[in-house]
Image (cartoon, rainbow, N blue to C red):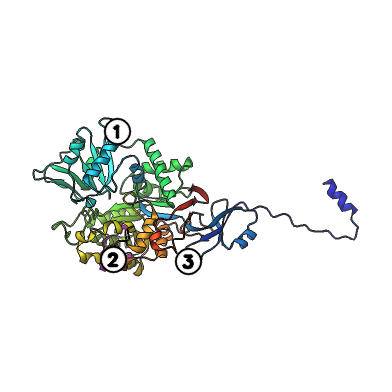
Amino acid sequence: MAAALSSACSEPESAQPTEIAPEPAAYPGTLVLNARIHTLAPTDAGRVHGAMVFNEEGRVEAVGAAEALAEAYPGAAVVDLGGRTVLPGLIDSHAHLAGLAQSFTRANLVGARSKAEALDRLREFAAGLPDGAWLLGRGWDQNDWPEPVFPSRQDLDAAFPDRPVWLRRVDGHAGWANSRALAEVDRDLAGDWQEEGGYIHRDETGEPTGIFIDKAMDWVERAVPPDAPELMSRALDMATAAMVRQGLTGVHEAGTSLELMELYRAKIAAGELPVRIYAMADGLNEALEWLCENGPYEDASGLLTMRSVKLYADGALGSRGAALLADYSDDPGNRGLMFMDGPTLDEQLRTVLGCGLQVGVHAIGDRANREVLDALERVMPEFPGNPGRHRLEHAQILDPADIPRFAELGVIAAMQPTHATSDMYWAGERLGEERLAGAYAWHSLAEHGAHLALGSDFPVEAVNPMLGIYAAVTRQDLEGWPEGGWLPEERMTREEALRGFTIEAARAGFMEDAVGTLEPGKYADFIVLDRDIMSVPPQDIPGTVVLQTRVGGKKVYER
């Protein structure tokens, strides 16, 4: 200070004061440059930007040219991506995060090409279990076996006579039990009785074969010991790590209990949740009661939201539980399972809508989809204050006459592209060729103005969303079969598919103002890829490698 005064006093009296501009303060944010950024913002259609800035709060400040942003935000921390591609973080609009977590603690039968291979995997897994402990697993699919018929409890009894075994089918809509597991059930399962929405397969003597469909599975599920909380917590960390490794920054959890909500909240408090969860209460349970009493929930972190309820209208196509308008072509006399009648469906919808919540209804067969659309058309006008955006989860098989009704009613189709490429080998046998006109009809739905939110249904399908984008664009398997794609008229463009995993998924969760595109004010949820999936040959999309994943600007994964 003294030196400054001395200098000033030595100047001539006639000299004018000189204003010296201060050094610009360093911007407390991050500048991403040398990138190929697809923002997916409506105003950026077809444009690719070279740089982006996000602030300390983890929100996008600006997207544009590197030189301009460097000048506008001096001193920002710099991340040079070396020409890599940046996309908004991908969102899986229908998946089972808790189911994925459980899959890391149970026998994995996904991809077993025969019953013998499934049994071999079970023996290997059981070798690490205590004597008498339940052997639990998931992923078997009789459609992939040389003889595509359901297995029996006797198959399991021969291999595991001394421990209960319970194995969920790959779609989660059928279960396979051994005799020791059935002995734990608190009801005599023999006879000819069935309950609504479920089916127990029995032999000619009336004894259960060990195969249970949909709601009938509950008899065995109630006997299964619950997972230890600490085991579930560790498994959830593995599941979210799998998500960010594949470029998923968000997931719509299609069925959540209040207990799981508490686990998610504990993870947030501990700083251990790296993804955003849009949780749907699992049916008319205690989670719905909590929501009706307290209102929609949004955690202050922005990582957890619950304002939706998942209901079930029918089963799955692979286990012939999807409710159809006509008989299964490969099982005459069977039209699948409706889980409830029309009046009951109406009352369940009234309960959910009356609490101001969104409803997402599992509907796979054409009958189930029609009945849910009919019920929504009846019930929605009774609740004009409800925010809407109700959803049909899966919407796999539609009567073509019902396709325009999605847009007319404002109902979202929450669909999973890889279901089509998994089912295409046998869907024609199940349905008959004439019903394929409304099968996995993505393009037709979009053409009629419906909103499509895309996902995977993991762990039913793989976590990797690049497989979903590839399936949507090509309708082919990874070997390129069939040539030209299965029912190719229903293919999506790359932009449509990518929007389904970003902004449309965000909209389906009322989050389009926060995530889904890279625009100023939104969270800096983005991924860095080793290739530009908007321009590489379609067959190169599945091999895309995620190099980095950020949620709210925070790096949650780096390869």
x, y percent for residue 458: 34, 50
Residue 362 forms part of the magenta stretch = no
Q: Which residue is mark 3?
A: 42
- How far from the left and from the top, in percent, is residue 334? 15, 56
Which disc number belongs to residue 487?
2
Q: How many marks?
A: 3
Is residue 110 or residue 225 the one in the foreground? 110
CA gap between label 3 and label 2 equals: 29 Å
Q: Earlier in the sequence, mark 3 or mark 2?
A: 3
Q: Residue at x 65, y 53 (%)?
A: 75
Quarter where residue 34 is shown? bottom right
Indicate the quadrant where residue 209 lies: top left
What segment carries the magenta color?
393-406
Q: Which residue is mark 1?
A: 129
Q: Counting residues from the N terminus, which is met first, the one under dot 1 or under dot 3?
A: 3
Indicate the position of residue 267 as horizontal and vertical percent values.
Answer: 44, 41
The type of residue carrying mark 2 is: Leu
Q: Judging from the image, what secondary structure is the residue with disc 1 in?
A: loop
> How many neighbours does mark 1 have within 10 angstroms: few (below 14), some (14-19), or many (20 or more)?
few
Could you tell me residue 359's position as x and y percent? 34, 55
Does the image show residue 416?
no
Label 3, secondary structure: give it.
helix
